[in-house]
Image: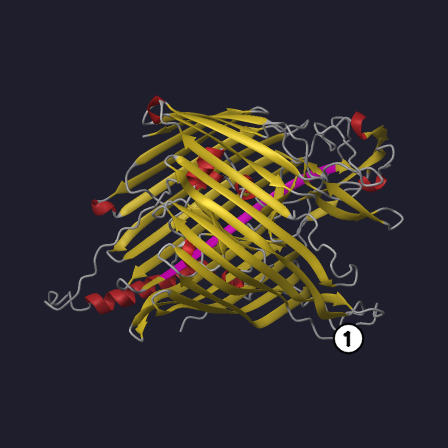
Amino acid sequence: MFILNVNGKENTIKPIVRAIQLALFSVWAVNHVVYADTASASLSEDSVQLPTITLYANKEEGYKANKLSLGKLEQSIKENPQSVSVITAKRIEDSGWATVDQAISQTTGMTVQSSGNVNATYYSRGFEVAVQKDGMNSGYASGAEREIDSLAMYEQIEIQRGAAGLLTGAGQPGGVINLVRKKPLAEDQINVALKAGSWSTWGATFDISNTFLEDNRLRSRFVADYENKDYFYDVAENENLALYGIVEYDLLPSTTLTFGATYDRREAIPEITGVPRNADGSDSKIDKTKYLGAAWNRWEIDSHSLFAGIEHRFNEDWSFKINGQYENRILNYQRAFYDGNNLNLDTHVFDQLTGYFSGDMKIEDYGFDAALNGQFKAFGRSHDVVLGYNMQRLEEPRPWLMLDPIKIPAVSLEDFDPYNVYRPDMPHVPTTTQRETTQKAFYAMTRLNPIEPLHVVIGARLGHWKFVNRTISTGAKTSAYEDRNVLTPYGGIVYELTDQLSVYASYADTFKVQTNYYTLEGDPLDPAVGANYELGMKQELWNGKAMITAALFRIDEDNRALAVPDTELKCPAVSGQCYANAGKVRSQGFETEFTGELLDNLHLTAGYTFNKTEYLNDIKFQSGDTYSPFTPKHIFKLWGSYTLPMYDQRLTLGGGVSLQSETKNIAQNKAKEQIDIVQSGYGLWNAFANYKVSDQINVSVNVNNIFDKTYYKKLGSLGSGNYYGDPRSFMLTLRAKY
């Protein structure tokens, strides 16, 4: 029996080692059964030799993806009974994106809340979205304290909107993003890209794939990506280096080993506070080129990861996979910005800065996933099944301190000089506390095919979530929350009306831990449960060259922590506020997307989302009030590229637009009055041109925000947290392939 203990501190380094040990044992066991007699005799005439199966990367040549790696069952987009979008390699190249954040912001139904140039959080349907890498939960997540991932190491990005608890475990019901790493190619290839653009941006990418040994049994791929850039505001700077390598080796004809590693280094002057609003919530129209912090601010992050896997194919129907990964991020920052609480909102005058600094904040993430996939026959038909177990452990120390206020002569924001700020002593910050989060789960899913056009998908996850906050010097727990045996169900029905058209209905769950809240009886609250209901259709067009999808959806998050009135300082467990599992919010709407080749050489992706979010039961808000005010009610995103028939089809032109309706944030002034901070609806237009100089070389130019629209990419409070979006910019890229 294989037992893995991840609760003890001493075992935090073991999951990947244990996973690899189990994988190698499995290979040995199967190999022993198949080849046990080869030492003493040759294989009999009745013996079966498994065929050699070599796996290669599959680069999608258009905007429509033919394969989907997201999920526990092998499936196409058409077979998945939820809303799914895929950003292919061609779409990434045409758009000229450099980071994951840029790609997500241009995807159907997605909202990116970006705080300056150092972090961003992804939302769908009013809820936060989880992040995976090759199907495994990543401590990367969205939000702060992470690297801004370079797109150079990913082949494509898969987004499933709506609850995905079976895939991710604990979390919100917004969905899941799967970052698919590049794999070795079937032939030796070298790709080089050089770029230069606005705000002194320049960079280079090298992507090399090689094959070795007979039958290409050993394959490798290496990517190096470097970018140095300033920003549209003063005192800006950002330097990124990303390295990625992967090796695949066919240990046996039916067994493949994978090992890889990444390294990211980012040095930036962070823009972390944004700008204020006026006292009445209206736009302050502060000069967007102003930097309102100290010129000595720094944000440095080193990120490392290791990942390994083994896949054994017993036969054409059954396979066993184990994947393990280890990630760590070391973050060091120092930052000081105008004090929003010290700011006069009428005159925009202030006389002190405040901020934080840190020691080496090392965030570590360990995890593995083991799954048995196969097909079985029943009632004369073939059915699919997957059984698995996964684990993730995240350790987050908190070595940071708040700066004492830095006094300066009274000055207006417009006249503030970032270089005229005293830099206080910043001693080493000892790491005193650490947060540890562990979740483990068994999961199972089956796709039943009772009759030819009908497919029934049923699955469940039985999870265990544990959080501990401890003092590092003593190991003593200062707080701990735990939820055991949380069942997360999933179900869907897909009915194929024709070979190209299918309709579906699905139900999916998530759960969010709330054991840090207590009832009147002193018991921890049950998890909040997010349930996603969806009805939709998926139609393939023109022999699979394009696809159109449409869906009606509703997400109810129920059992949310709701404060019980008149119980302040009365809760038995914490001598504080008591809560009940009574809060509820809802998100519902309609979504449609077209992706693929509309005409010969005309590739297009277009998506529209209508989304309404509301409180159904809450203490602070009335029933019907907007739950997620930063989520636009209407979102439309369009992008296309067309290769002209003249000039020997060397010239490709394209572009698109992102349109969204009004958004807002709800703030309070000093008199505790509610103030609405509103961002009017707006559109951003982008375009590109690509010229194929030869079969190996092409040059492209991208123009973003063509009409130089001034807008806010995130709204905050009256005093701070309102961030300008990027003005018009240009990028010239030279690509060569050999």
**Which residue appears at 68% of the width and 54% of the height?**
432
Name the chief secondary structure element in magenta: strand
Q: Work out which residue is located at the far front of the displayed protein and give it.
A: 497
Q: Is residue 333 left or right of residue 454?
A: right
Residue 560 location, x and y as percent? 69, 65
Q: Is residue 625 visible?
A: yes
Q: Nearer the viewer, residue 160 or 27?
A: 160
Q: Is residue 678 above or below residue 230?
A: below
Identify which amino acid the numbered label 1 is placed on.
Leu
Residue on which the image places disc 1: 520
Quadrant for residue 377, please give it: bottom left
Q: Give the quarter of the figure containing the C terminus.
A: top left
Q: Could you say where residue 735 lies in the image, as x and y percent from the top left?
A: 40, 28
Q: Relative to 418, does residue 59 appear above or below in the rendering?
A: below
Q: Which residue range is magenta in the image?
A: 321-336
Nearest the camera: 30 or 723? 723
Determine the residue positioned at 50% across, 46% down.
304
Relative placement, left or right, of 54 versus 151 is left
